[in-house]
Image: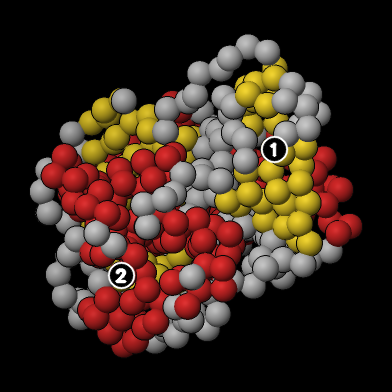
């Protein structure tokens, strides 16, 4: 078998066999196949796409290129959640405790932020003492005792994906639905949960900018999950506007706690309840309506908040900052961003809002950048709100005053103020399952 023939076959639009895909991925991981040949293959996929069989074969091969997590020591059904990333996306901190409080286990490995999107691990590390790195035995113990655990990605999971993503990033082949699906789902299969809920963001702050592309990606991933024997559902949710009001690590933890107390922003609360309800459906708890009601009850009776506190304490974190979020370390400086004219906020570019928070120190511009956990932005006005000149649009937090100028200009570039009233976009666009696509 020759790599040349595999590249040519895919270039000409033919379906590759499981053996051919296996030969390619295994050879690449062993450094027997050079980057230039893999780059040629990825470009062929970019233009020709992949069939349902090919994406499943490739996902399985990439998943098995490293460690495969065995979660059998954890009792009961395990449901995982994955978000394609966004600005102000602190949903895991809310959804996982809700699901755990309703009797379904959540054993989750999350990533760090890079670029304009925040990472769940960074948010959790803003909690003093919280350990995002646990041994297998510690991880299993925390989940069995508290119902949930969220840690950083560890071990040798999907090394093929790490190598291929680095290559895609420099060869203009990132933006390919089958390759995105393989990358995401290989990690989810390797993570070992029984069921998978996918939160596919769409809009200016998301990786997928259009609704149709978001649905196409969701359909691809649901097929892969179901074909691999994992019950899988995807929700298409809005990321044209930042989710909630807080952008930045400890600020987002505070907002997550407020939401678990029933006092969170309406948009964040609604999205989290629907994500949690669908995870409970996957866990066999009941119908979607029944699961939505159970999720709402867990906020009202405080049981979801207690699950978060239990997880934080089990992983060495100081739960005082959860019980009283005023105990979080505060930024040295704050700055109010004022409206420059009267009008209605007709749009917000979520990506630019995220970049503004990075300029304040809340995110990473490179993998080695240090994160300031107290930095970020609190939004006081969002799309559809009327503002007068001089009104406070947002409050920024940073460790140095000189950081505000660049962040403020980036933020002003994200806001469009006009005279015509704009309709607020839906929070939920569609639900994708093995039964098909249901648009809301």
**In the image shown, does 366 or 405 lie closer to the viewer?**
405
Q: Name which residue lies at 24% across and 59% down.
A: 301
Q: Residues within 10 Å of mark 1 (few under 14, many from 20)?
A: many
The image's colouring method is secondary structure
**Is 130 drawn above or below residue 17 in the view shown?**
below
The answer to whether 399 appears left or right of 230 in the picture is right
The answer to whether 88 appears left or right of 268 in the picture is right
Residue 200 circle label: none
Q: Quadrant of residue 155?
A: bottom left
Q: Residues within 10 Å of mark 2 (few under 14, many from 20)?
A: many
Residue receiving disc 1: 393
Q: Name which residue lies at 28% across and 84% down.
A: 141
Q: Quadrant of the C terminus?
A: top left
Instruction: Please report whichever mark, 2 or 1, sits nearer to the chain's N-terminal start.
Output: 2
Between marks 2 and 1 in the image, the one whose residue lies nearer the viewer: 1
**In the image shown, does 136 or 256 lie closer to the viewer?**
256
Q: Name which residue lies at 63% across and 49% down.
A: 378
Q: Is residue 8 visible?
A: no
Residue 307 circle label: 2
Q: Quadrant of the N terminus?
A: bottom left
- Residue at the extreme top: 420
Where residue 368 appears, as percent x and y from the top left, is 71, 70
Q: Name which residue lies at 39% across and 45% down.
A: 269
């Amino acid at each position: 078998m020759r790599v040349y023939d595999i590249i040519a076959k895919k270039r000409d639009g033919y379906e590759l066999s499981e053996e051919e895909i296996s030969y390619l991925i295994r050879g690449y991981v062993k450094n027997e196949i050079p980057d230039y040949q893999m780059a040629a293959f990825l470009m062929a996929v970019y233009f020709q796409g992949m069939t349902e069989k090919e994406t499943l074969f490739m996902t399985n091969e990439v998943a098995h290129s490293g460690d495969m997590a065995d979660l059998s020591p954890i009792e009961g059904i395990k449901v995982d959640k994955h978000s394609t990333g966004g600005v102000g996306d602190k949903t895991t901190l809310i959804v996982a405790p809700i699901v755990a409080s309703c009797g379904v286990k959540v054993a989750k490995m999350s990533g760090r932020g890079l670029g304009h999107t925040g990472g769940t691990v960074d948010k959790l590390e803003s909690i003093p003492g919280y350990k995002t790195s646990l041994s297998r035995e510690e991880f299993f113990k925390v989940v069995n005792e508290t119902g949930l655990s969220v840690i950083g990605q560890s071990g040798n999971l999907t090394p093929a994906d790490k190598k291929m993503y680095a290559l895609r990033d420099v060869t203009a082949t990132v933006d390919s639905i089958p390759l995105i699906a393989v990358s995401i789902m290989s990690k989810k299969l390797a993570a070992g949960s029984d069921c998978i809920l996918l939160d596919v963001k769409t809009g200016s702050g998301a990786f997928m900018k259009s609704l149709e592309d978001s649905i196409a990606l969701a359909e691809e991933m649901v097929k892969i999950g179901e074909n691999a024997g994992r019950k899988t559902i995807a929700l298409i949710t809005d990321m044209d506007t930042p989710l909630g009001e807080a952008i930045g690590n400890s600020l987002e933890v505070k907002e997550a706690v407020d939401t678990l107390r029933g006092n969170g922003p309406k948009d964040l609360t609604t999205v989290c309840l629907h994500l949690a309800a669908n995870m409970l459906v996957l866990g066999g708890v009941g119908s979607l309506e029944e699961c939505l009601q159970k999720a709402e009850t867990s906020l009202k009776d405080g049981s979801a908040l207690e699950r978060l506190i239990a997880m934080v304490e089990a992983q060495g974190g100081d739960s005082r900052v959860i019980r009283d979020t005023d105990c979080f370390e505060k930024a040295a400086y704050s700055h109010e961003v004022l409206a420059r004219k009267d009008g209605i906020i007709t749009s917000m570019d979520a990506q630019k809002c995220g970049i503004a928070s990075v300029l304040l120190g809340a995110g990473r511009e490179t993998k080695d950048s240090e994160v300031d956990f107290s930095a970020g932005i609190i939004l006081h006005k969002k799309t559809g709100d009327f503002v007068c000149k001089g009104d406070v649009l947002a409050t920024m937090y940073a460790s140095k005053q000189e950081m505000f100028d660049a962040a403020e200009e980036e933020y002003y570039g994200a806001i469009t103020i006009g005279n015509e009233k704009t309709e607020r976009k839906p929070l939920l666009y569609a639900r994708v399952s093995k039964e098909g696509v249901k648009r809301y």
